[in-house]
Image (cartoon, coloured by chain):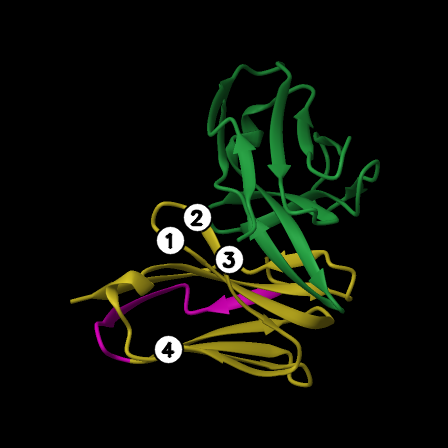
Chain colours: A green, B yellow
Amino acid sequence: EAAVTQSPRNKVAVTGGKVTLSCNQTNNHNNMYWYRQDTGHGLRLIHYSYGAGSTEKGDIPDGYKASRPSQENFSLILELATPSQTSVYFCASGRRVSSAETLYFGSGTRLTVL
Amino acid sequence: GDQVKQSPSALSLQEGTNSALRCNFSIATTTVQWFLQNPRGSLMNLFYLVPGTKENGRLKSTFNSKESYSTLHIRDAQLEDSGTYFCAADNTGNYKYVFGAGTRLKVIA
């Protein structure tokens, strides 16, 4: 079974501070994704990556950066956190077989920006 | 958002009954995934679909690409089926999945 681990599970930050959310997957999946989940919006894609060294903008990238230093690790960085970034963040990795890709999600990080 | 519209937004089912959840797409999509988020918040993949039908136990899902919709049928609902069901569409086939807002399902005894 795919294993995607996020840290921290919970985080409280102050406005203007820097926040780094980490994600690690141990299944050698090429693709990794960062989503945020807010009531009424489902999950919205922030950044994604096709492999080590690659980062791509998703649908709502403003205010976020991403880093993929290795196949296993994908970080989401908030350089100047704002209260509007209070949310639950999910990381996922994608297992691709032929043209099919199944997403495996981490347990989520609940971020509160005061 | 409205690119992937799920209905109903919430549903309460008696244990043992059947129901269907639906996703309508206003974006071009070649594949659809269905997920269940359990009450603890964990997201589990239920189905990955190209146009056609898949079945797994009491769940069956269909993706009709010509009419831009997908359905998830739940047969003989059990208490552990409770949670929020999300569908996600592969926007233009580039693996950028767009999620619907979800259907909150509560199965009652």
Check the image and report above or below for B79 versus B65: above
Label placed on residue B38: 1
User: Pointer 4: what residue?
Assistant: B58
Point 61% across, 47% down: residue: A92
First of labels 4, 3 by sequence position:
4
Q: For the residue labelled by badge 4, is the local secondary structure a helix, a strand or a loop?
A: loop
Residues under numbered marks 1 and 2 in contact, where contact means CB atoms less than 8 Å apart: yes
Q: Main secondary structure of the magenta part?
A: strand
Looking at the rendered structure, whether the residues under marks 3 and 2 are on a common chain is answered as yes
First of labels 1, 3 by sequence position:
1
Q: Magenta part of the protein: which range?
A: B4-17
Q: Residues within 10 Å of mark 3 (few under 14, many from 20)?
A: many
Side of A74 relative to B88 (left or right): right
Check the image and report above or below for A85 versus B17: above
Q: CA distance from mark 4 to mark 2?
A: 20 Å
First of labels 4, 1 by sequence position:
1
- The disc labelled 3 sits on which kind of residue? Ala
Q: CA distance from mark 4 to mark 3?
A: 23 Å
